[in-house]
Image (cartoon, rainbow, N blue to C red):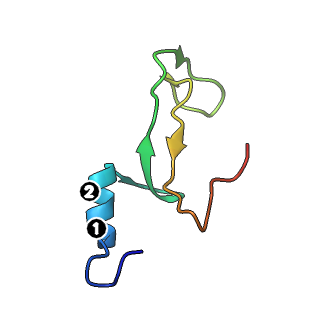
């Protein structure tokens, strides 16, 4: 177990994991960028990527939610 003196700061963790701010869910790391582009539809601007899934960090005390 880490003690307080050796525990990394939030900033060190963000840098180490390459996390970037996300407007709706804190900090995330992009895991995949689809080459497929979707044209504009209705009010949605386009073209846009088909998917850009992200993986928020998790800890043993907060495992990722099942999908």
The label on residue 31 is none
Left or right of 37, for residue 4: left
Q: Say which of 47 and 20 sits in front.
A: 20
Q: CA distance from mark 1 to mark 2?
A: 6 Å
Disc 2, SS: helix
Disc 1, SS: helix
Q: Residue 30: which quarter of the image?
A: top left
Which residue is at 36% across, 52% downward?
Answer: 19
Q: Residue furthest top?
A: 36
Label 1, residues with CA under 10 Å away: few <14, some 14-19, many ≥20: few
Left or right of 66, for residue 3: left
In the picture, which quadrant includes the C terminus?
top right
Q: Is residue 2 above or below residue 13?
A: below
Q: Which residue is mark 2?
A: 15
Q: Residue furthest front?
A: 1
In the picture, which quadrant includes the N terminus?
bottom left
Which residue is at 26% across, 65% downward?
Answer: 12
Picture coordinates of residue 22, whole percent (x, y)? 44, 54
Picture coordinates of residue 10, whole percent (x, y)? 34, 70
Picture coordinates of residue 9, whole percent (x, y)? 30, 73
Q: Pointer 1 and pointer 2: residues touching (CB < 8 Å)? A: yes
Picture coordinates of residue 66, whole percent (x, y)? 73, 47
Label 2, residues with CA under 10 Å away: few <14, some 14-19, many ≥20: few
Q: Residue furthest right?
A: 67
Q: Which residue is mark 1?
A: 11
């Amino acid at each position: 177990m880490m003690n307080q003196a050796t525990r990394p700061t939030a900033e060190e963790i963000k840098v180490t994991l390459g996390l970037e701010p996300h407007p709706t869910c804190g900090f995330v790391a992009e895991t995949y960028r689809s080459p497929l582009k979707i044209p504009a539809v209705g009010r949605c601007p386009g073209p846009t990527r088909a998917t850009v899934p992200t993986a928020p960090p998790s800890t043993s005390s907060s495992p990722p939610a099942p999908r």
